[in-house]
Amino acid sequence: MDVNIQKCQNCGSREMRNILARTSSQHVVVQCRKCDEFVARYQIASGGYFHNGKDYESFLRTMMLDSGFTSGRDLRAVFEEVSESAAATFDRAINKAKEKYGDELP
């Protein structure tokens, strides 16, 4: 796993705002909080958006945008798998970032 903490190309700040934009596909648009410049845009893969702390109904609304599941049982299993996987990925990413940037992350 390679990790990078986003930095504004304009002013060098690491203070970012993520804006989720939902159209026919989902995107995250990143804006610098210091200078308000556009920093980056990420397209989220189908089924790739997961918001920790949100409930199953929120997950269902997101999955409705992607479709492709035939039963509630399938969706519940995917929700549980994504929830566990997202938490594990977060932990790994934080550990890798600390290895790269030190204990006090920028």
Image: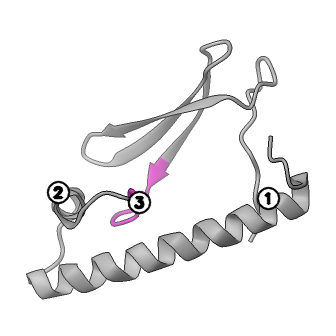
- Residue 61's tag is 2
Mark 1 or 2, which is nearer the eye? 1
- Residue occupying the far top of the picture: 35
* Separation (CA) of disc 3 from disc 2: 14 Å
Tell me the SS state at disc 1.
helix
- Residue 97's tag is 1
Q: Is residue 22 placed above or below 71 in the rendered structure? A: above
For the residue marked with disc 3, what is the amino acid?
A: Asn
Check contact, mark 3 vs mark 1: CB within 8 A. Answer: no
Do we see residue 30 in this rendering? yes
Q: Main secondary structure of the magenta part?
A: loop
Label 3 CA crowd tier, 10 Å (few <14, some 14–19, many 20+): few
* Separation (CA) of disc 1 from disc 2: 32 Å
For the residue marked with disc 2, what is the amino acid?
A: Arg
Mark 3 or 2, which is nearer the eye? 3
Magenta residues, start to end: 43-51
Looking at marks 3 and 2 on the same chain, the residue that comes earlier in the sequence is marked by 3
Please identify the quarter of the rendering in which residue 11 is found. top right
For the residue marked with disc 1, what is the amino acid?
A: Ala
- Residue occupying the far left of the picture: 71
Q: Is residue 106 placed above or below 70 in the rendered structure? A: above
Label 1 CA crowd tier, 10 Å (few <14, some 14–19, many 20+): many
- Which residue corresponds to the image point at 69% horizontal and 72% vertical from the top-left? 92
- Residue 52's tag is 3
Looking at marks 3 and 1 on the same chain, the residue that comes earlier in the sequence is marked by 3
Residue 104 point in image, percent of width and height = 84, 47
Q: Nearer the viewer, residue 102 or 5?
A: 102
